[in-house]
Image (cartoon, rainbow, N blue to C red):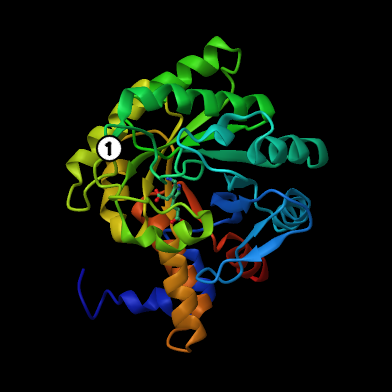
Amino acid sequence: MYFPVYRPRRLRRSSNLRELVAETRISVDDFIYPMFVIPGRNKKVSIKSMPGIYKQSIDNLIKEIREVKKLGIKAILLFGIPEQKDEVGSEGYDENGVIQRALREIKKKIQDIIVITDVCMCEYTSHGHCGIIKDGDVDNDETLQYLARMSLSHAQAGADIVAPSDMMDGRVGVIRGDLDRNGYDNIGIMSYAAKYASAFYGPFREAAESPPQFGDRRSYQMDPPNVREALREIELDIEEGADIVMVKPALPYLDVIRAAREEFDHPIAAYNVSGEYSMVKAAGKLGWIDEELVMMEVLTSIKRAGADLIITYFAKDAAKVLSRK
Ligand code: PBG
């Protein structure tokens, strides 16, 4: 059926009609809100390149989580910035580390919020790499036991899901094994399965004070030109026991999200990373784009590409827009 009998514009005439035939809907249920916790009391430090996002001490974190919950957001992704960094990232798996303390406080004071913790060495190591350094290089197999130890300490402190973001080979299996042996078989793993070596992480590294002190992350994170390799990475993580698999960043890798959606049944998360957030915020501030409309379009595109869950610094802003609709 062709024009003039068929006229696609008929179903675009009003917002009610458009809503009726919308193929993709985003909901507050899809969002995971990343948050940064630091040691101390009554601290709230803004991150220059990420307006609206803060590094904060546990007391202030709790306040913001209450607000997040009121907006209907069901999950947060927690990053810790330790007091001290060292060669082996020991605060990352210390039972009195900042994440572990935060987890205990959150679980004591707040009901019904899913807490996912980022598991990686880079926020805790003095050299800023995601693993243990041996002979000037990140040693894959040596790193695995540290990641497992960190995951276990998060589980013991109350994490619901652990999210390894280091990109070491074999880590999901080792983490799963360690959690299970210790009675944490109900704790989920959301693996950063296809995580690219991306320049879009710049603002995050300012926030987490985690840029590598030498070299870069290209020997462990994925190379941007590859999509078939991403599917192999995701398959490995699923085989090793990942419950949710992630593609990261989101916007420059929508094709990877789509390919993953077509290949796998597992829930797929996409991380709308710091640089993607900063670009929209910056252009919005300059008056070059309509920030709110662009934000909603970006989030819709990630969902349309096939993501089930969206990790985004926009979670609160978008939740407010959605509740007005
Ligand atoms: C830790 C980690 C990073 C991000 C999440 N976990 C940084 C990196 O790998 O350099 C990036 C998140 C963002 O940019 O919003 N490895």
Q: Total number of numbered labels? A: 1
Q: What residue do we see at 74% from left, 34% from top? A: 104
Whole-percent x, y for residue 64 in the image: 73, 57
Residue type, numbered disc 1: Gly
Indicate whether 216 appears above or below 119: below
Crowding around mark 1 (Cα neighbors within 10 Å: few <14, some 14 to 19, many 20+) is few
Return the residue found at the far top: 181
Whole-percent x, y for residue 169 in the image: 30, 28
Residue nearer the viewer, 285 or 227:
285
Q: What residue do we see at 36% from left, 27% from top? A: 238
Indicate whether 234 appears above or below 19: above
What residue did someone put label 1 on? 136
Instruction: Quadrant for the C terminus, please.
Output: bottom right
Whether residue 169 can be seen here: no
Instruction: Quadrant for the N terminus, please.
Output: bottom left
> In the visual, does 37 lie left or right of 282?
right
Whole-percent x, y for residue 254 in the image: 31, 56
Return the residue found at the far right: 109
Whether residue 269 can be seen here: yes
| CB of mark 1 near ligand 1 (< 8 Å) | no
- Name the element at disc 1: loop
Indicate the quadrant where residue 63 lies. bottom right
Indicate whether 232 appears above or below 20: above
Residue nearer the viewer, 28 or 58:
58
Q: What residue do we see at 54% from left, 32% from top? A: 90
> In the visual, does 316 lie left or right of 304?
right
Residue nearer the viewer, 113 or 72:
113
Indicate whether 283 appears above or below 223: below
Whole-percent x, y for residue 276 in the image: 41, 65
Q: What residue do we see at 70% from left, 58% from top? A: 71
